């Protein structure tokens, strides 16, 4: 995964699972890390689709991933 430039933050959450070839749990932990990152950045406490909607949705999203021009 390092050769694919996976962010070190993601690897820190799933490295133990990768070392024992537990790929299902590696992906599961990596996905959980993204939600955790979003909660840390926004102060939100929700999860799943609600978290994503609250963080990235609306006219004034809490997180912007581009210049928000369109």
Image: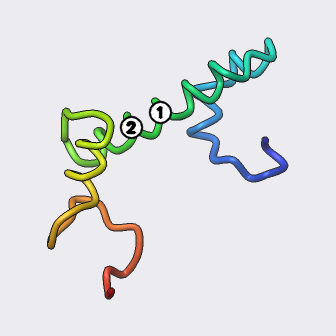
Question: In the drawing, does residue 10 fall left or right of residue 55?
Answer: right
Question: In the drawing, does residue 12 fall left or right of residue 50?
Answer: right
Q: Residue furthest top?
A: 20
Residue ID at (24%, 52%): 53
Sort mark 2 into few (<14), some (14-19) or many (20+) by Cα contacts within 10 Å: some
Q: Residue furthest bottom?
A: 69
Viewer-closest of 38 and 48: 48
Question: In the drawing, does residue 25 fall left or right of residue 59?
Answer: right
Residue ID at (30%, 39%): 40
Q: Position of residue 70 (x, y in %)?
A: 33, 86
Numbered badge on residue 42: none
In this picture, is 47 found above or below 38?
A: above
Q: Which residue is mark 1?
A: 33
Question: In the drawing, does residue 24 fall left or right of residue 19?
Answer: left
Q: Which residue is mark 2?
A: 35
In this picture, is 61 found above or below 16?
A: below
Q: Position of residue 30 (x, y in %)?
A: 56, 32
In this picture, is 20 found above or below 67?
A: above
Q: Residue furthest left?
A: 59
């Amino acid at each position: 995964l390092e050769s694919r430039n996976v962010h070190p933050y993601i690897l820190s959450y799933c490295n133990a699972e990768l070392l024992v070839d537990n790929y299902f749990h590696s992906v599961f932990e990596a996905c959980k890390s993204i939600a955790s990152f979003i909660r840390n950045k926004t102060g939100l406490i929700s999860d799943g689709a609600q978290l994503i909607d609250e963080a990235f949705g609306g006219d004034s999203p809490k997180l912007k991933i581009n210049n928000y021009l369109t």
